[in-house]
Image: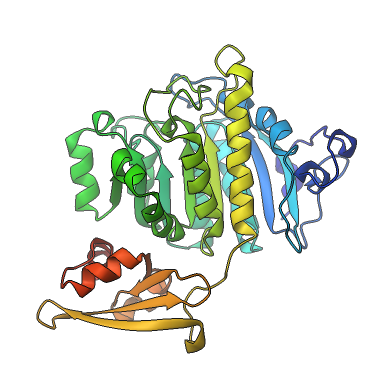
């Protein structure tokens, strides 16, 4: 597929960036489209905000963020190959934009290239999801957001209803959804009940901030991560018309995106709802912050351990825990490379092809301790219910 038909070129010049900065190392879509043969990460901007609720102007975010991203110095990586493919302009209809985004992400994923999407409004997550339908791949989606964006059945796809469209979409390729950082006063009880009924995961802001390390296994299980900038407190990220006083601190947001980069499973991440209006984004503070969040994702990517449990028993330790009067046995794996934990969840053999990617669930040492205390880890039980 010729991806260049979807993109407009950029006007960056190598002379604008100092040696050893990202801008001096990234392959830009300028006079010609980048050769993606050895590309590991592709950055794409999407100039789309027609379905943004009370946040028109976020379509301008990609070009506002890039100057700050490419002035940052790259890490000490033995090999780095990143391409900036340019911007996908808003199509004649919103469906045209969704088709372009899904086609691009799908093609990149087929070629083992991780995609960084700079939006644009958060309804683009729906387009990102459609890319995996093209691949016929069931996925785990993690959203860092102060609410669930379920909307109502009557609402069209927009930045505050896209999640219900993903859940109801047929054929459905969503295996699990996790929200990180929701704020209770923004979420009605029936939405929480729906999350529980579907065995999805929702983590309150206070719960997450009290133990940021527990975010790592949540994000490690994701194929797709969506980051709504309104999940960050207004004082740290003012460039959003829906910004609120509470949320993550900037350094916590960077920690989450580094966890995402470290995940061997993750193949695309999106940053949405950044509105670079000069009257709102003081000194381009939010553009600075998102650039650093992307930097941390890239740094995580180039520090991946590639230690997902395999048949090589020398790479991990295996623990067996019996609980509930020997009714269940939980098998844990601990990586010798990174000290990360996984637990195996059994599934019907007739669903092997569909669920094989999901039966090893990232977890933490805390989950192992829970099992040793003869208690069922929530992550194990919720996954078991979906696999059964």
Residue 88: image location, x then y, percent: 67, 37
Q: Is residue 265 visible?
A: yes
Q: How is the image coloured?
A: rainbow
Closer to the camera, 121 or 237? 237
Residue 67: image location, x then y, percent: 73, 32
Q: Is residue 361 left or right of residue 105?
A: left
- Image-quadrant location for residue 7: top right
Q: Residue furthest left?
A: 325
Q: Is residue 68 left or right of residue 155?
A: right
Closer to the camera, 32 or 82? 82
Q: Residue furthest top?
A: 279
Residue 312: image location, x then y, percent: 51, 87
Q: Examine the rendered structure and indicate whether residue 335 appears above or below residue 143.
A: below
Q: Examine the rendered structure and indicate whether residue 141 appears above or below residue 343.
A: above
Query: Residue at left 31%, top 32%?
Result: 151
Residue 290: image location, x then y, percent: 58, 35
Q: Is residue 287 left or right of residue 330?
A: right
Query: Residue at left 83%, top 37%?
Result: 17
Q: Examine the rendered structure and indicate whether residue 329 appears above or below residue 46.
A: below
Q: Is residue 158 visible?
A: no
Q: Quadrant of the N terminus?
A: bottom right
- Circle count: 0
Q: Quadrant of the C terminus?
A: bottom left
Closer to the camera, 153 or 62? 62
Query: Residue at left 38%, top 46%?
Result: 166
Query: Residue at left 29%, top 51%?
Result: 201
- Image-quadrant location for residue 199: bottom left
């Amino acid at each position: 597929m010729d991806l260049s038909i979807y993109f407009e070129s950029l006007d960056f010049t190598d002379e604008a960036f100092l040696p050893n900065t990202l801008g001096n190392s990234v392959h830009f879509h300028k006079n010609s489209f980048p050769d993606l043969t050895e590309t590991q990460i592709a950055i794409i901007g999407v100039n789309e905000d027609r379905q943004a609720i009370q946040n028109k102007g976020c379509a301008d975010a990609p070009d506002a963020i890039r100057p700050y991203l490419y002035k940052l110095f790259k890490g000490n990586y033995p090999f780095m190959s990143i391409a900036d493919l340019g911007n996908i302009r808003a199509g004649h209809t919103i469906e045209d934009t969704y088709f372009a985004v899904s086609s691009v992400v799908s093609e990149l994923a087929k070629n083992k290239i991780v995609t960084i999407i700079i939006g644009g409004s958060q309804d683009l997550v729906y387009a990102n999801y459609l890319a995996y339908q093209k691949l016929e791949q069931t996925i785990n989606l993690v959203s860092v957001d102060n609410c669930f964006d379920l909307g109502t059945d009557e609402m069209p796809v927009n930045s505050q209803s896209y999640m219900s469209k993903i859940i109801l979409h047929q054929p459905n390729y969503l295996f699990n959804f996790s929200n990180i950082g929701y704020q209770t006063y923004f979420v009605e009880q029936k939405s929480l009940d729906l999350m529980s009924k579907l065995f999805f995961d929702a983590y309150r802001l206070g719960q997450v901030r009290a133990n940021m390390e527990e975010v790592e296994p949540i994000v490690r299980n994701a194929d797709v991560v969506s980051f709504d900038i309104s999940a960050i407190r207004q004082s740290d990220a003012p460039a959003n018309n829906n910004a609120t006083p509470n949320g993550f601190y900037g350094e916590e947001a960077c920690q989450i995106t580094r966890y995402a980069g470290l995940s061997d499973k993750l193949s695309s991440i999106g940053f949405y709802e950044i509105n670079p209006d000069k009257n709102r984004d003081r000194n381009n503070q939010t553009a600075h912050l998102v650039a650093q969040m992307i930097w941390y994702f890239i740094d995580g990517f180039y520090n991946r351990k590639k230690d997902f449990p395999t048949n090589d028993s020398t790479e991990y330790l295996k623990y067996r825990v019996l609980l509930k009067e020997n009714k269940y046995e939980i098998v844990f794996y601990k990586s010798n490379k990174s000290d990360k934990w996984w637990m195996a969840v059994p599934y019907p053999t007739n669903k092997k092809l569909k669920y094989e990617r999901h039966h090893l669930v990232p977890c933490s040492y805390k989950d192992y301790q829970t099992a040793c205390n003869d208690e069922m880890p929530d992550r194990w039980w919720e996954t078991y219910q979906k696999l059964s």
